[in-house]
Image (cartoon, grey):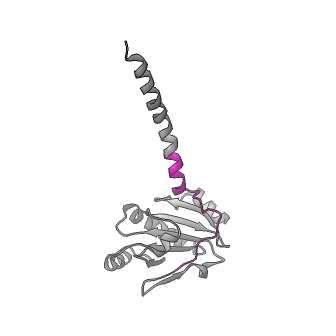
Amino acid sequence: MPFAPYYKDVRFPRFLTLALLPALALATGCDRGAHPAHVDKPAPDFTVSDGSTSIHLADYRGKVVLLNFWATWCAPCVEEMPALIQLHHDRPDLAILAVSVDEDEGAYKRFLARHRVDLITVRDPNETAAKLYHSDGWPETYVIDRQGIIRRKFVGDPDWSSAEIRAYLKGL
């Protein structure tokens, strides 16, 4: 039995490592959730123009803004778009600004036409605005209050028709 103490020594660190992995995963994922580091801070201002549309965030001060970063090749973004369009129709008081990171202008324009996207959207292939928000996963949506403060970040395709989200937005 000369290997028994060695076996115990090896098992303990492995057990400890396995026990700490979920905590580490949660800690690293927190910044991509609803409470990233820049919540409760001023939203970075930007101007993006693609030749046919221009968005200057400061122009929307005084309105609640949903700033959505998306792409036509992103499956969750495509799934989310009808819900954002419906929210736009249900709540015209909200400014829903959709910033596409598409490089392919033709694919972007075909998508807008095919899906009848009638909310404000602009193509930003250089990710100028997304970089200001440290966004690199799509879709990501920032909720910005009337004073220009980021209040929440949604990652992925939330249920924009849910009573909880609608109540939250109404409360702003």
Quarter holding the C terminus is bottom right
Q: Residue furthest front?
A: 2
- Of 124 and 110, which appears nearest the observer? 124
Q: Point out the stretch of residues depicted in magenta.
A: 25-46
Report if residue 39 lies within the magenta region.
Answer: yes
Which corner quadrant of the image does residue 63 belong to? bottom right
- Of 145 and 132, which appears nearest the observer? 132
- Of 107 and 5, which appears nearest the observer? 5
135 above or below 6?
below
The residue lying at 45 percent from left, 79 percent from top is: 122
The residue lying at 44 percent from left, 21 percent from top is: 8
Report if residue 5 lies within the magenta region.
Answer: no
Which corner quadrant of the image does residue 71 belong to? bottom left
In x, y percent, where is residue 171? 67, 64
Q: Residue furthest bottom?
A: 51
Quarter holding the N terminus is top left
Is residue 153 toward the left or the right of residue 72 in the image? right
In x, y percent, where is residue 49? 46, 84
Query: How would you classify the magenta stretch by its main secondary structure?
Result: loop
The residue lying at 57 percent from left, 58 percent from top is: 36
5 above or below 104?
above
Which corner quadrant of the image does residue 110 belong to? bottom left
8 above or below 44?
above
Could you tell me how many numbered marks the image carries? Answer: 0
In x, y percent, where is residue 75? 36, 62
112 above or below 172?
below
